[in-house]
Image (spheres, helix red, strand yellow):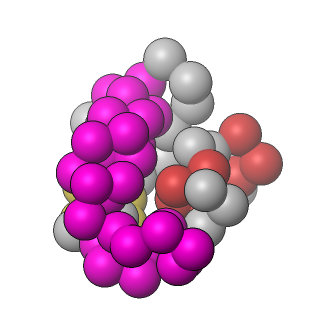
Amino acid sequence: MIAFAAKDDDGQEVAAIAKLCDYASNTLISRFTPERTEIDSVYDLRAVFQTGHRDMKLDALPPLLCGLN
């Protein structure tokens, strides 16, 4: 799945992409991903941001986008 972020969305906690990641993690992805498998083994969510790569705070992105869930 690919999510396209709005111009001012940098993936931080209160942004729409972060809310989408939280929702997807707790509903769709957790429902269809078998236990004891990687979170992205069935659904792989990617995000496209309009923020420049030098301005992104990668360490503050939702864990789902970093493969940490």
Image-based side of 52 in relation to 22, left or right: right
Against 41, is 5 above or below?
A: above
Q: Name the foreground residue: 49 vs 23.
A: 23
- Find the magenta span and give its range: 15-44
Quick check: is 18 in the magenta stretch?
yes
Quick check: is 25 in the magenta stretch?
yes
Q: Position of residue 41 (x, y in %)?
A: 41, 82
Q: Name the foreground residue: 64 vs 29.
A: 29
Against 22, is 49 above or below?
A: below
Determine the residue positioned at 61% across, 56% down: 69
Residue 9 seen in the current view: no
Determine the residue positioned at 32% across, 35% down: 23
Q: Position of residue 60 (x, y in %)?
A: 71, 40
Q: Position of residue 50 (x, y in %)?
A: 38, 50
Determine the residue positioned at 40% across, 47% down: 25
Determine the residue positioned at 57% across, 44% down: 62
Q: Name the foreground residue: 57 vs 1.
A: 1
Q: Residue furthest top?
A: 14
Residue 62 seen in the current view: yes
Against 17, is 42 above or below?
A: below
Q: Position of residue 24 (x, y in %)?
A: 31, 45
Choose top left, top right, bottom left or bottom right for residue 57.
Answer: top right
> How many numbered tags mark residues here?
0
Q: Which quadrant does the N terminus fall into?
A: bottom left
Q: Residue furthest front?
A: 35
Against 63, is 8 above or below?
A: above
Choose top left, top right, bottom left or bottom right for residue 42.
Answer: bottom left
Image-based side of 11 in relation to 25, left or right: right
